[in-house]
Amino acid sequence: MPLSLFGETKITFICNQDGISRFSGEHAKDYVLATMLKPNDAIRLSVYLDYNSKSELYNVGFEYLTKDDIPSERTIKFSELTERYAQQRILSYKRQNGVKKIGRNDPFPCGSGKK
């Protein structure tokens, strides 16, 4: 399960628990890089947390990623991922908050920082 924070601190947490399908490796890195595009982040800290089946943390890793980490031959792919993840965040926000439309003065949940 990924969690991205937007604002002054640019951090994405990737949490995995044993026995549940993993979100790790290249997929996790691709997610973080795609997340950086919409708000035009220069750098983002990725924190990887692994939990066992008893919810005990047993491994922590991290890396700093920049836009330069996006291979030029995959730019179109990352742009598509960016849009897909933004739409997923919007739908998730609506479901979690029981709303059908984002309010006029509400922060936009896609990660762009804009309305």
Image (cartoon, rainbow, N blue to C red):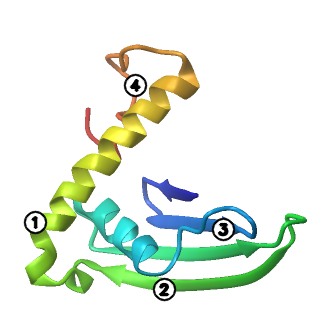
Please tell me how crowded label 4 is: few (under 14), some (14-19), or many (20+) other residues with Cα within 10 Å.
few
Secondary structure under tag 4 reads: loop
> Mark 4 and mark 1: span between their CA atoms?
30 Å
Nearest-to-viewer mark from 2 and 1: 1
Cβ atoms under marks 4 and 1 closer than 8 Å: no
Q: Amino acid at mark 1?
A: Ile
Cβ atoms at labels 2 and 3 below 8 Å apart:
no
Which quarter of the rendering shows the C terminus? top left
State the mark number for residue 16. 3
- Residue carrying label 2: 63
Q: Check the picture and name the quadrant holding the N terminus.
A: bottom right
Label 3 neighbourhood size at 10 Å, few (<14), some (14-19), many (20+)? Answer: many
Element type where label 3 sits in the image: strand
Real-space Cα distance between discs 2 and 1?
A: 23 Å
* Three-letter residue code for mark 3: Asn
Q: Which residue is mark 4?
A: 106
Q: Where 10 sits versus 47, above or below?
A: above
Q: Nearer the viewer, mark 4 or mark 2?
A: 2
Mark 4 vs mark 2, CA separation in Å: 31 Å
Q: Is residue 33 visible?
A: yes
